[in-house]
Each structure stands twice: as structure tokens, then as C-alpha cells.
Image: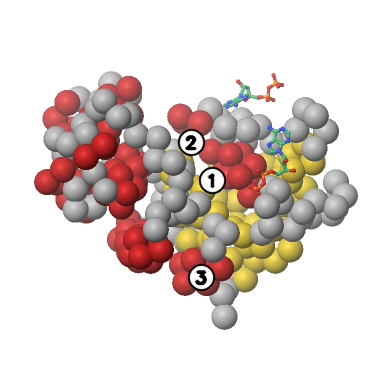
């Protein structure tokens, strides 16, 4: 767990598009911040910069007291969860959850312990030997969460993780995600289009607006929902 601070962060793509301008805010340790704003205002870009998948052009990204702006994604201890779960279809649930840990050459017994712990937490223990094709949408989403949790990351970044689910499941998963965040106490930045999600899930809601000029901040406000 760590605080995550955007300090005057800016991003201009090589074609000249200014996607993010002068954005500063801090997500406190264990806090759940929801990021909203119209399409094209830089939400995904901000998330991808936090993950290290896109480099900043200006400003800094600070985790606790460490400047991680130039740290490679795999060394940031940040887990990203997308809407298209990106599970490996030919692997079992167990193998999907273990994969990232195996890449890190972690001992087998330790991997098994972490996978079983996450599966227990997500109610997936019964499905560990199934392949993703034999799971429901909600179960697949939980496997995607499990892959992030096993690493015990310092922060979660979620880009509309529930937008592919039907309305009923979305409501259920909102509650589950929130509970999980509270149990694990993981600092979270959560992007959504859904107003209800923003109001019900966010400890605070950050609102971005489209970039108008490259010096003014395109962070409109960050507040506790009413
Ligand atoms: P949001 O997630 O809020 O919809 P994005 O971060 O995807 O916004 O995009 C912000 C702006 O940056 C948009 O104008 C978009 O067209 C532009 N953009 C996104 N990715 C690229 C890219 N790889 N190259 C050039 N422009 C991009
Ligand atoms: P350059 O000046 O060559 O464009 P950057 O300033 O973008 O490099 O990157 C600075 C550091 O970040 C380098 O150590 C580089 O290896 C690393 N880096 C660059 N792009 C990425 C990326 N997409 N993901 C992770 N690390 C990156």
C-alpha cells in the first residue's frame, strides 16, 4: 500500500495531441478514487502513465516518497485491470492466476499459497481447474482481479472493469470490488463512465475536462461525493 501522487503531470502524444495537461492530485494510502469525465479527456492516458505504459512529458509520478516516473511497469508494484479481462483461454483459472508469479521465478509452493489465498477471497476455489470459456462473465472478472491480487500490489488501476457486464452483475460486482478494496486496503484509481458507480464507489471523485490549452490543468475538481 502506498499513496500515489500525480504532480503537474502532462502528456502530449507524438502527433501533437495534448491528452493530459498539468494534472495534480494525490490518492491517499488505501483510498478509492474514481476518475470521470467526457470521452477523450485523458482518463485512459492518465491511468496508462500511472502503470508505466505511457511516459510522462512533464511532471512527476510519486509513490509514497519515491519518484517512479521512469520506473519500468513491472517494477512499480501496480496492477492494472481492464474491461476485456485478457485471460489466457488455453490456461486454467489456476494457471491464469499463477502466470505472473511464475514469470518472476517465485518458488512453486509460494505461488500455490498466493493463488489459493486469492481464490478463497474471490470465491473461485471450486473453479481453479476450469478454463475461462467455462466461466460466467462475473467469474471471469474475478479471475482478472485474482491475477492482480496475487501479486499483492501497492495500487490497483482499473479502466472501466465492469462495463462489459450486464446491469445486474455490474451492481453485484460494484459491491464486491468495493469490499475487496476495503479488505485489502489497496490504493485504487478507478475509471468509469457510470455516474452511479462514481457516486457509490468513490471515496473521492476526480473530474477531468478536455484539454483547452496546454498550460491550464484539465483536472476540473476532486471531491467527496455528496
Ligand atoms: P479518455 O480515456 O478520457 O477517453 P484518452 O486518454 O483515451 O481519453 O485520450 C485523450 C486524448 O488523447 C484524446 O484526444 C485521444 O484521441 C488522444 N490519444 C489517445 N491515445 C493516443 C495516441 N496513441 N496517439 C495520439 N493521440 C492519442
Ligand atoms: P526516450 O527519451 O528514449 O523517449 P523516455 O524518456 O520515454 O525515453 O523513457 C525514459 C525511461 O523510461 C527509459 O529508461 C525507458 O527505458 C523507459 N521507458 C520508455 N518507454 C517505456 C514504456 N512504454 N514502458 C516502460 N518504460 C519505458
**Label pair 1/2, CB-CB below 8 angstroms:** yes
- Picture quadrant of ligand 1: top right
Residue shown at the point (74%, 58%) measured from the top left: 209
- Please state, as top left, top right, bottom left or bottom right, where the C terminus lies in the image: bottom right
For residue 75, side relative to residue 88 (left or right): right
Mark 3 falls on what kind of element? helix
Location of mark 2 (residue) = 76
In front: label 1 or label 2: 2
Mark 2 falls on what kind of element? loop
Residue 63's mark?
Answer: 1
Q: Position of residue 3 (x, y in %)?
A: 51, 53
Task: Find residue 44 and report its image quarter.
Answer: top right
Say few, some or many: other residues with alpha carbon within 10 Å of mark 2 (under 14 / 14 to 19 / 20 or more): some
Location of mark 3 (residue) = 196
In front: label 3 or label 2: 3
Which one is in front, 192 or 119?
192
Q: Earlier in the sequence, mark 3 or mark 1?
A: 1
In front: label 3 or label 1: 3
Residue shown at the point (83%, 33%) measured from the top left: 16
Amino acid at each position: 500500500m502506498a499513496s500515489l501522487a500525480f504532480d503537474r503531470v502532462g502528456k502530449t502524444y507524438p502527433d501533437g495531441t495534448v491528452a493530459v495537461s498539468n494534472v495534480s492530485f494525490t490518492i491517499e494510502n488505501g483510498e478509492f478514487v474514481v476518475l470521470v469525465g467526457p470521452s477523450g479527456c485523458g482518463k485512459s492516458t492518465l491511468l496508462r502513465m500511472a502503470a508505466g505504459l505511457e511516459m510522462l512529458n512533464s511532471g512527476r509520478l510519486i509513490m509514497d516518497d519515491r519518484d517512479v516516473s521512469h520506473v519500468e511497469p513491472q517494477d512499480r508494484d501496480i496492477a492494472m485491470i481492464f474491461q476485456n479481462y485478457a485471460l489466457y483461454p488455453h490456461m486454467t483459472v489456476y494457471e491464469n492466476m499463477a502466470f505472473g508469479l511464475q514469470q518472476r521465478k517465485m518458488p512453486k509452493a509460494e505461488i500455490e499459497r498466493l493463488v489459493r489465498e486469492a481464490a478463497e477471497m474471490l470465491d473461485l476455489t471450486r473453479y481453479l481447474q476450469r478454463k475461462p470459456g467455462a466461466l460466467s462473465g462475473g467469474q471471469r472478472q474475478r479471475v482478472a482481479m485474482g491475477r492482480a491480487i496475487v501479486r499483492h500490489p501497492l495500487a490497483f488501476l482499473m479502466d472501466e472493469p465492469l462495463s462489459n457486464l450486464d446491469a445486474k452483475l455490474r451492481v453485484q460486482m460494484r459491491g464486491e470490488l468495493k469490499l475487496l478494496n476495503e479488505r485489502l486496503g489497496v490504493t485504487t484509481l478507478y475509471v468509469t463512465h457510470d455516474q452511479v458507480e462514481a457516486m457509490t464507489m468513490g471515496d473521492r471523485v476526480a473530474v477531468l475536462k478536455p484539454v483547452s490549452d496546454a498550460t491550464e490543468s484539465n483536472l476540473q475538481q476532486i471531491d467527496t461525493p455528496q
